[in-house]
Amino acid sequence: MRGVNRVFSRYVLIVNDERREAFTAIFGRSRVPIESEVPEQARLPRFGSTAVYKIDLKMLTQQQRQLLEAHLSRVWDMPIEMVEAETAAHGVPIMAEGTTLVEIDSEPDFA
């Protein structure tokens, strides 16, 4: 039976120009996989309390994860080892502001 065990992949499209450029350099596109379509509140340095999605690190290639961690190391001026440890322990938030939620159906219906 079609549709019973459908799988949807969740992404955010980065619509903010500056952030889109950075994420396109890392992922090769402005679409970033996220764990949940429901944003959560997080306190981010320089931004305070803000709505965030968490990047779905399981969906990244090893190269994408390394590029992401190197980018975060540069942006936040943190040693790469610290970024790797924080990423492994807490994941990677992405601000919900400046994004558009997209769900992709793994089993599209065609007429």
Image (spheres, helix red, strand yellow):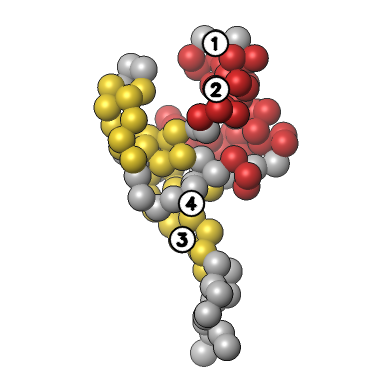
| Label number found at residue 11 | 4
Q: Residue 55: where, in percent of width, then height?
A: 51, 40
Contact (CB < 8 A) between labels 2 and 1? yes
Placement of 93 over or under 10, stated as above or below: above
First along the sequence among labels 2 and 4: 4
Tag 3: amino acid: Glu
Report x, y in % for residue 27. 61, 39
Between marks 1 and 3, how big is the CA–CA gap? 33 Å
**What residue sits right under mark 2 in the picture?**
86
Task: Kindly indicate whether the residue at mark 3 contacts the one at mark 4 (C-beta within 8 angstroms).
Answer: yes
Give the position of the N terminus as an image quadrant.
bottom right
Quick one: label 1, few (<14), some, or many (20+) residues within 10 Å?
Answer: few
Spatial CA span between label 4 and label 3: 6 Å
Q: Earlier in the sequence, mark 1 or mark 3?
A: 1
Give the number of the disc on residue 103.
3
Q: Residue at x 72, y 34 (%)?
A: 63
Residue 90 versus residue 25: which sits nearer the camera?
90
Q: Which residue is mark 1?
A: 78
For badge 4, the amino acid type reads: Tyr
Report which quarter residue 73 is drawn in: top right
Kind of residue indicated by mark 2: Glu
Mark found first going from the N terminus, 4 or 3: 4
- Name the image quarter holding residue 66: top right
